[in-house]
Amino acid sequence: MSPPDRGPVDLDTGIFSSEFVRSGSALADAYRPLTDGRAFLVSFATEAEVRFGATLAGWGQARTRRLEQQLSRAAVIWPGPDLLAAYVDLRVWCLRHGHGLGQKSHEADRWIAATAMLFRVPLVAHDAVFRGVDGLDLITTLPA
């Protein structure tokens, strides 16, 4: 776990969405000291994942409004040539090194990690698949 320096961070979908689901309250509580008061960005993949989940679950107006407010606070990073290049480099590195992030099931996770790497900000995530990625600064509460 990197020491939090209060600079901006990239929030993984699980951390970003933990504020909106009852089952995520313990996760939100654990990460709040690491994220409160910090500017944050999210990948377009995170926005897509949370909007999909909210729509599938049939969220009501109040919770959807909270989601919209939280998204409006984030710098949502959309794909472009620089992010595409960072994604390609990351995917190649993962495949050459046999890293789990290279697996097909981690498509969105690769975009999220590439976003953090491109903007040189830590990724806040509670997912071990991000461990050991060369050039990725990971902030997590997962035990080492």
Image: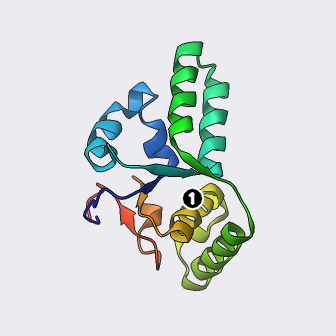
Point out residue 77 in the picture as x, y percentages from the top left corner. 62, 54
Amino acid at the residue labelled 1: Ile
Name the residue carrying label 1. 112
At 29% from the left and 50% from the top, the residue drawn is 34
Q: In this view, does 70 lie above or below 118?
A: above
3 vs 113, left or right, is left
Residue at 41 percent of width and 32 percent of height: 19
- Label 1 Cα neighbours within 10 Å, binned few <14 / some 14-19 / many ≥20: many
Compared with 43, 17 (above or below) is: above
Query: Left or right: 11 with respect to 118?
Result: left
The picture places residue 43, in percent across and down from the top left corner, at 59, 53
Outermost residue to the top: 61
| 23 vs 34, nearest the viewer | 34
Q: In which quarter of the image is residue 48?
A: top right
Q: Which colour assignment does the render follow?
A: rainbow
Percent position of residue 2, x then y: 29, 66
> Who's the residue at 30% across and 56% down the image?
6
Tell which of 74 and 28 is nearer to you. Answer: 74
Residue displayed at 62% across by 42% down: 47
**Could you tell whether 128 is left or right of 103 in the image?**
left
Residue 144, image x, y percentages: 27, 66
Disc 1 on helix, strand or loop?
Answer: helix
Q: In which quarter of the image is residue 85?
A: bottom right
Q: Quadrant of the N terminus?
A: bottom left
141 lies left or right of 96: left
